[in-house]
Image (cartoon, rainbow, N blue to C red):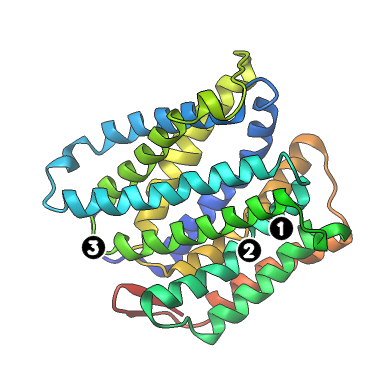
């Protein structure tokens, strides 16, 4: 978490790695949720991740930045948990493909929210890259009934807003707070909130199958503890908009994993969408980078 400024390519590659982990774990989580209720799974996932993070960053609690780090992490954790819950319950009332598309609204929302927070809009290359990648996301996930807005769609739209604020808030605090404490606080907050809701928000069920144990181990240690630690560190050097743009690769990795594990074939439209997502990222990556204040711009 410490050290000088890393190379820009290394920061971006770290964020790509997070998108890879999140996309690759989709199949594991989907299988596990057949044997465990969703909020209980999230509770166990966040609790296990919190325990691991507290152990790793236990020496950081003597930091002079303790109050600011915990405050920023708690705020980020509220939006992180809100995004997970809204998306989970939204899935009950709308299709998975629509959920994927509407959740992706956080990509164009991040520069808008970031513009309000930083009082400075991203450069044209970032905006063009976001628009291109979001178009690709639409091609990969959109359905004919996308304009048929229902209750579930509104819940998932709220999830997109929550994810956008989570990324922007991390960008706001990552440059000045203790990165270790920041990630501990946000995951611990999500663990507390999920613990307070799983037992009444939905029927609790669990069958301790191998798929549940494997999914919990992978998602808590890799997709939560490691992924959010890396994201928090990377956002010290990457703008919220750039982070959201790179995260748009998650559905590409999710499809690649589904293809390797289950033989799922992507349609021509889906392939076109994946190409546009990569093109949007390249549009930003090929633009020279420069540091302005606490925010990295292209």
Q: In the visual, does 163 lie left or right of 271?
A: left
Q: Nearer the viewer, mark 2 or mark 3?
A: 2
Estimate how packed mark 1 is, as few (under 14), some (14 to 19) or many (20 or more) residues with alpha carbons within 10 Å: many
Whether residue 51 is situated above or below residue 132 in the rendered picture? above
- The residue that mark 3 highlights is 176
**Do the residues under discs 1 and 2 have CB atoms within 8 angstroms?**
yes
Q: Position of residue 210 (x, y in %)?
A: 62, 16
- The residue under the point 48% across, 37% down is 222
- The residue that mark 2 highlights is 105
**Precedes in sequence: disc 3 or disc 1:** 1
Which quadrant would residue 234 be assigned to in this image? bottom left
Which quadrant would residue 292 be assigned to in this image? bottom left
- The residue that mark 1 highlights is 101
Q: Position of residue 252 (x, y in %)?
A: 69, 54
- The residue under the point 55% across, 77% down is 284
Q: Can residue 48 be seen in this view?
A: yes
- The residue under the point 65% across, 26% down is 32
Which quadrant would residue 289 be assigned to in this image? bottom left
């Amino acid at each position: 978490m410490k050290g000088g400024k890393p190379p820009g390519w290394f920061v971006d590659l770290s964020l790509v790695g997070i998108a890879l982990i999140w996309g690759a774990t989709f199949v594991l989580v989907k299988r596990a949720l057949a044997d465990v209720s969703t909020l209980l799974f999230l509770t166990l996932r966040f609790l296990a991740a919190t325990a691991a993070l507290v152990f790793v960053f236990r020496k950081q609690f003597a930091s002079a930045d303790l109050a600011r780090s915990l405050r920023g992490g708690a705020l980020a954790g509220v939006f992180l948990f809100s995004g997970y819950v809204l998306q989970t319950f939204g899935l009950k009332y709308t299709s998975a493909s629509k959920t994927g598309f509407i959740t992706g609204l956080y990509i164009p929302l991040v520069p808008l929210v970031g513009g309000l927070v930083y009082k400075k809009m991203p450069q044209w290359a970032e905006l063009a890259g976001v628009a291109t990648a979001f178009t690709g996301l639409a091609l990969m996930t959109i359905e004919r009934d996308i304009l048929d807005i229902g209750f579930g769609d509104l819940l998932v739209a709220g999830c997109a807003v929550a994810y956008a604020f989570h990324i922007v808030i991390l960008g706001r605090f990552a440059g000045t707070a203790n990165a270790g404490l920041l990630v501990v606080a946000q995951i611990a907050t999500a663990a507390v909130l999920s613990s307070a809701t799983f037992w009444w928000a939905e029927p609790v069920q669990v069958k301790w199958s191998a798929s549940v144990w494997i999914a919990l181990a992978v998602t808590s240690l890799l997709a939560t503890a490691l992924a959010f630690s890396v994201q928090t560190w990377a956002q010290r050097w990457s703008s919220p908009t750039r982070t959201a743009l790179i995260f748009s690769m998650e559905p590409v990795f999710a499809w690649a994993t589904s293809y390797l594990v289950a033989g799922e074939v992507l349609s021509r439209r889906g392939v076109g969408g994946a190409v546009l997502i990569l093109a949007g990222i390249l549009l930003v990556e090929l633009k020279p980078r420069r540091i302005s204040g606490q925010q990295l711009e292209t």
